[in-house]
Image (spheres, rainbow, N blue to C red):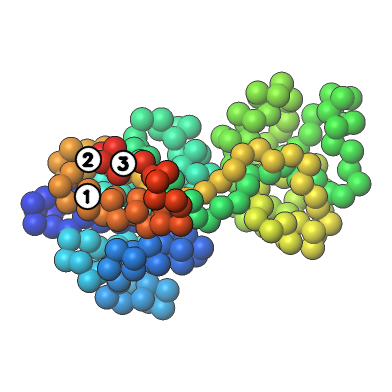
Amino acid sequence: MIDNIETSPVTLALSKGRIFDETMPLLALAGIKSEESPANSRRLVFSTSDPYLRLIIVRPSDVPTYVQYGAADFGIAGKDVILEHTFQKPDGLYQPIDLNMSKCKLSLAVRRGFDYYAAIKQKMRLRVATKYIQSSREYFSNKGIHVELIKLYGSIELAPLVGLADAIVDLVSTGNTLRANDLEVIEDIMPISSRLIVNRASLKTRRTRLKPFLDAFWYASNSSHDSKNLKNPNNIL
């Protein structure tokens, strides 16, 4: 990083949306607030009430990249995004804390009435639309199912409705969007939640600066649990 490593604040990478909305209360529990609301600003870098912490706002899929390459010391991203990143760069991130927020599932869904299992038995080569190519490829490979994966960046639910794909792999929370588009989940692939990720070099060079914030996130994310069952936060670093 260009700034003086001893005096500059550590940088936390966040993305706007659900993760951002659920992270702000965790920071507030640690007595930290942004000096300006990122939700209502076009700025991308924000100071906070703690002089040793600043925030940067990036696209959700870019959070792991900013952290891995040291533009941010740590960040918060969904497990879905982290998996896609680490399939390509497996050793670049340290993931010390599951924050137990933004929970949902990565699921396989089809149009209502489509007999997915009959198609599989007939060894049809299905087309599957998804943002999560790597996770989907691993899922179908482990099941020995050959599919054609189609990369999309949004409106995944549309693909089966217009004949682009036979199925989709996407995040599902309430399932309302699927039902509104006459789709149904046939298999849940994995649970998803938001994770704290840390740059490995920062763990060594900025350990003293980072640890109070990691401890604060750990305590905040576990505040609803029975304190007798909490692990020792000293194991985080």
Q: Which residue is mark 3?
A: 232
Residues tagged 3 and 1 counted as in contact (Cβ below 8 A):
no
Residue 210, disc:
1
Of residues 27 and 197, the one drawn nearer to the viewer in this rendering: 27
Marked residue nearer the N-terminal end (2 or 3): 2
Secondary structure at numbered mark 2: helix
Mark 3 element type: loop
Query: Gap in Å between the C-alphas at discs 2 and 1?
Result: 7 Å
Counting from the top left corner in percent of width and height, residue 74 is at 30, 49
| Residue 135 placement, left or right of 215 | right
* Mark 3 nearby-residue class (10 Å; few <14, some 14–19, many ≥20): few
Question: Residue at point 58% right, 35% down?
Answer: 135
Q: Are marks 2 and 1 in contact (CB under 8 Å)?
A: yes
Left or right of 231, for residue 109 = right
- Left or right of 61, for residue 11: left
* Amino acid type at image mark 1: Leu
Kind of residue sitting beneath label 3: Asn
Q: Check disc 2 and report the residue beneath it.
A: 203
**Does residue 203 lie above or below 9 as drawn?**
above
> Could you tell me which residue is drawn at 81 percent across and 52 percent down?
183
Q: Position of residue 16 (x, y in %)?
A: 45, 64
Disc 2 from disc 3: Cα separation? 18 Å
How far from the left and from the top, in percent, is residue 152?
Answer: 63, 48
Residue 175 visible to an observer of this rendering: yes
Q: Amino acid at mark 2?
A: Leu
Q: Earlier in the sequence, mark 3 or mark 1?
A: 1
Q: Secondary structure at mark 1?
A: helix
Name above or below for residue 164 compared with residue 20: above
